[in-house]
């Protein structure tokens, strides 16, 4: 039996999943941890990680380490995504992590690799054949066109809940202005126009990942009094349901958003900026439904690891 610990250091949150993998190939998730670190906070045009954000992140990584170091037969995979990927002081941050978190080596993965892992996480756990996968994180958005169960095209865009909010709603996160929402939507739509293959996703369902997108489902499930409102894997929402939630969010001030059932209070200041991309792409592709996935990068790494184990065993 092997314990696979996968750390996904995103721009807004750090997450770790520990999975027991048995000799017969079966597996069971035994631990999930999450810390809101806002690593990409105030990176600005200079694209540098700030000391306070790095301090929060390193503390989260230390918390994770306390857990996985207690486990037997551990295989560790720790990846960092958009915030570290774009940071001009990336080397300094990675050196700090290695020095302060007992030699932890973070692997900075490309945007296309992040999208690939999203695809593996979705395709192995949801019955989807043709769709567009959308993972909106804190500082990047991954899109994957899936046709006949295969990833035909994928891309990573430098937009997410944190950097969009800072760009379009800076100092105005209390009451959202119509003109700011307009310029954000216009900006995102122009990015979509620049993806030559995206029109081939016309009328296909969206499979949504990422904290902001998943929050949409949690808010709606809380509203309709679902028993476990956070159990959203495979949950389906129609476009009009998503638009209703979005309209309610952007119509509230910050204090009111913090009180929305199903919305984490520490996400209230970035939720409007974070869900604008999915509302925009639904109209761009004239899609009529969204399926939500709990599984993304960490699960994609898990399935890749299981496949590699099986291939290795077959060669013996």
Image: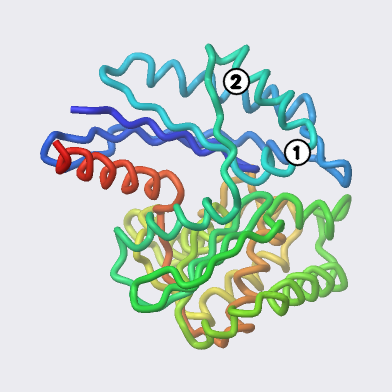
- The location of residue 281, given as percent across then percent down, is 61, 76
Residues marked 2 and 1 touching at CB (< 8 Å)? no
Q: Quadrant of the C terminus?
A: top left
- Picture quarter containing residue 66? top left
Instruction: Work out whether 62 lies above or below 150.
Output: above
The number of discs equals 2
Q: Which residue appears at 84% of the width and 71% of the height?
A: 183
- The location of residue 304, given as percent across then percent down, is 34, 47
Q: Camera-side residue: 113 or 226?
A: 113
Residue indicated by mark 2: 59
Q: Which residue appears at 72% of the width and 41% of the height?
A: 40
Residue 87 got which mark? 1
- The location of residue 313, given as percent across then percent down, is 16, 38
- Picture quarter containing residue 237? bottom left
The coloring applied to the image is rainbow
Q: Nearer the viewer, mark 2 or mark 1?
A: 1
Q: Residues within 10 Å of mark 2 (few under 14, many from 20)?
A: some
Q: Residues within 10 Å of mark 1 (few under 14, many from 20)?
A: some
Q: Quadrant of the N terminus?
A: top left
Give the SS element for disc 1. Answer: loop
Q: Report the residue that reaches farthest toward the front.
A: 315
Q: Which residue appears at 53% of the width and 87% of the height?
A: 202
Distance from the alpha carbon under mark 2 to that under mark 1 = 19 Å
Instruction: Work out whether 190 lies above or below 12.
Output: below
Q: In terms of sequence position, does the residue under pointer 2 or pointer 1 come before the other?
A: 2
């Amino acid at each position: 039996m092997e314990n696979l610990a996968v750390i996904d250091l995103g721009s807004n949150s750090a997450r770790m999943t520990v999975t027991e993998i048995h000799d017969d190939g079966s597996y069971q998730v035994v631990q999930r941890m999450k810390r809101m670190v806002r690593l990409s906070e105030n990176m600005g045009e200079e694209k540098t990680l700030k000391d306070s954000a790095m301090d929060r992140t390193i503390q989260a990584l230390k918390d994770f380490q306390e857990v996985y170091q207690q486990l037997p037969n551990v295989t560790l995979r720790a990846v960092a995504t958009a915030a570290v990927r774009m940071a001009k002081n990336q080397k300094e941050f990675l050196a700090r992590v290695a020095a302060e978190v007992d030699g932890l080596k973070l692997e900075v993965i490309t945007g296309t690799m992040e999208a690939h892992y999203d695809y593996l996480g979705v395709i192995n756990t949801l019955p989807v054949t043709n769709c567009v996968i959308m993972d909106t994180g804190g500082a990047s958005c991954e899109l994957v066109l899936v046709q006949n169960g295969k990833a035909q095209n994928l891309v990573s865009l430098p937009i997410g809940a944190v950097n969009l909010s800072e760009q379009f709603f800076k100092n105005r996160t209390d009451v959202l202005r119509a003109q700011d929402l307009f310029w954000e939507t216009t900006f995102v739509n122009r990015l979509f126009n620049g993806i030559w293959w995206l029109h081939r996703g016309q009328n296909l369902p969206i499979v949504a990942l990422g904290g902001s997108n998943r929050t949409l489902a949690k808010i709606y499930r809380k509203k309709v009094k679902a028993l476990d409102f956070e159990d959203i894997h495979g949950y389906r929402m129609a476009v009009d349901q998503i638009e209703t939630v979005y309209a309610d969010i952007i119509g509230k001030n910050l204090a009111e958003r913090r009180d929305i059932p199903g919305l984490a209070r520490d996400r209230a200041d970035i939720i409007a900026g974070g869900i604008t991309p999915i509302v925009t792409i639904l109209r761009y592709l004239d899609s009529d439904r969204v399926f939500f996935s709990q599984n993304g990068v960490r699960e994609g790494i898990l399935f890749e690891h299981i496949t590699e184990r099986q291939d290795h065993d077959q060669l013996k």
